[in-house]
Structures are given as C-alpha cells and as structure tokens.
Image (tube, rainbow, N blue to C red):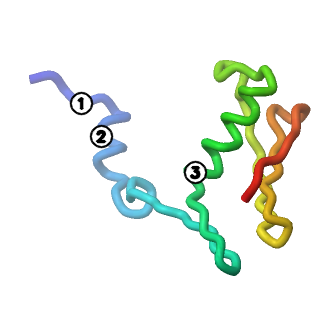
Amino acid sequence: MARKSSVERANDLTGGFASAQKNVVIQYGSCERKVDDILAAVKADACNKGISDADFSRVDVYVKPEEKKVFYVINDKENGSVDF
C-alpha cells in the first residue's frame, strides 16, 4: 500500500469548519438568494460579455439587497451587475 502524501494527510487532519459543507443564504425582505446562485449569475453575465471561463483569476462580488442588485468586478478591471 502506498503512503499518503502530506496533502492527503493534512486534509484528513483538518476536518471541522475548514472541510464542512457550507450553505450561505442572503435574505433581505421577501428576497432570498443562495451565494452559489449569485455566483452562477455573475459568471453567466460575465461570460455573456465575452470573458471566457479560463480568464477568471479574481472575482469580487458586492451584494446590495436594498437596491436588488449584485455588483461584480472581474480581474480588477471588468465590472457589471446582475439582479438580486
């Protein structure tokens, strides 16, 4: 049997919060959105604007539920927004 790599051993030891499955939901008034759904909408919007999946290196997302908008910046230069 082969020895585990140090990465595999570290992953086995971390447990707890670091490896826990996470579900984040943003609620505001009668609106409720999962973070995964917001990120999917941001990715789709950016891809529709000509940014390819391979071009993403940084994504900053700003949720403004009071405006019912999610603003984003891709790679510190491309920006846009999607509906919350």
Q: Quadrant of residue 63?
A: bottom right
Q: Are marks 1 and 3 in contact (CB under 8 Å)?
A: no
Q: Of residues 74 and 50, which is closer to you in this image?
A: 50
Q: Amino acid at mark 1?
A: Lys
Q: CB atoms at circles 2 and 1 under 8 Å apart?
A: yes
Q: Which mark is residue 9?
A: 2
Q: Secondary structure at mark 3?
A: helix
Question: Foreground mark, 2 or 3?
Answer: 3
Q: Secondary structure at mark 2?
A: helix
Image coordinates for residue 10, horizontal then vertical, percent: 36, 43
The vertical placement of 79 against 27, above or below, is above
For marks 2 and 3, the one nearer the N-term is 2
Q: CA distance from mark 1 to mark 3?
A: 36 Å
Q: Give the image location of residue 77, x and y in percent.
A: 91, 32
Viewer-side residue, 69 vs 57: 69
Is 66 rendered above or below residue 56? below
Q: Amino acid at mark 3?
A: Asp
Quadrant containing the N terminus is top left
Quickly name the residue at label 1: 4
Real-space Cα distance between discs 2 and 3? 32 Å
